[in-house]
């Protein structure tokens, strides 16, 4: 059982073979009183810190704090450049960042096209562009969700105005 002063295992709640190996290492270091299996307190403490840093990186990655997660992974890789878990996690973080950047660019382009269609007096075309946006779940410095909501409001208003004009023209 863990000592009351032991920090919680940083891999708690994670799944997969890598996290299981990290959990076993963490438990072994803790069971040895912070010492490596060979008796070296320095090595044991270093492993303990690396496992903790990697666990924090995973938690930050899962929470969407990718820059913080990368910083923690880079700390691990600075000490152990061949650490496969850290290298793999770094790749996953970078892939997520790249995908989010592409999605932000796609949404921004559609919002620009929506605004251009509204400016041209073509609310139906604006609605078509806006309909391609889909749910907004990407992260970034700009609040794309609020931008999409503003565009939706503007398109709905423009469509209502157009319907009113058509109704007035028929009557």
Image (cartoon, rainbow, N blue to C red):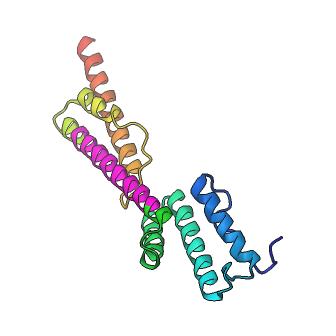
On the image, the x and y values in percent for residue 149 come to 40, 44
* Residue 51 against residue 144 in the figure, above or below: below
Q: Is residue 123 left or right of residue 35?
A: left
**Residue 110 magenta-highlighted:** yes
| Residue in the foreground of this view, choosing between 95 and 107 | 95
Location of residue 52 by image quarter? bottom right
Q: Residue at x 30, y 17 (%)?
A: 167
Of 32 and 39, nearer the camera is 39
Residue 8 seen anywhere in this rendered image of the structure = no
Pick the quarter of the image with the N terminus.
bottom right
User: Can you see residue 77?
Assistant: yes
- Residue placed farthest to the right in the image? 1
Q: Main secondary structure of the magenta part?
A: helix
Q: Name, please, the residue furthest toward the front.
A: 38
- Residue 13 is situated, as x and y percent measured from the top left of the image, at 67, 57
Which residue appears at 30% of the width and 48% of the height? 102
The quadrant of the rendering that contains the C terminus is top left
Left or right placement of residue 110 versus residue 22 in this view: left
User: In screen coordinates, is 2 left or right of 129?
Assistant: right
Q: Residue furthest left?
A: 120
Up-down relation of residue 26 to residue 159 (above or below): below
The image position of residue 101, as x and y in percent, is 32, 53
Q: Quadrant of residue 66?
A: bottom left
Residue closest to the far top: 170
Foreground: 136 or 23? Answer: 23
Boundaries of the magenta span: 88-114
**Residue 17, horizontal then vertical, whole percent:** 60, 53
């Amino acid at each position: 059982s863990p000592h009351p002063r032991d920090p919680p295992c940083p891999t708690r709640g994670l799944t997969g073979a890598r996290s299981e190996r990290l959990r076993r290492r963490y438990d072994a270091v803790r069971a040895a009183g912070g010492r490596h299996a060979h008796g070296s307190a320095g090595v044991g403490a270093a492993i303990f810190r690396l496992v903790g840093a990697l666990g924090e990186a995973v938690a930050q990655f899962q929470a969407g704090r990718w820059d913080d997660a990368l910083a923690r992974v880079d700390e691990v890789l600075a000490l152990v450049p061949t650490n496969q878990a850290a290298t793999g996690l770094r790749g996953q973080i970078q892939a997520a960042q790249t995908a989010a950047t592409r999605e932000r660019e796609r949404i921004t382009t559609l919002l620009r096209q929506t605004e251009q269609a509204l400016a041209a007096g073509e609310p139906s075309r604006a609605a078509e562009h806006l309909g391609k946006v889909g749910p907004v779940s990407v992260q970034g410095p700009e609040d794309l969700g609020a931008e999409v909501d503003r565009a939706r409001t503007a398109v709905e208003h423009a469509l209502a105005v157009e319907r009113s004009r058509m109704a007035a023209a028929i009557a």
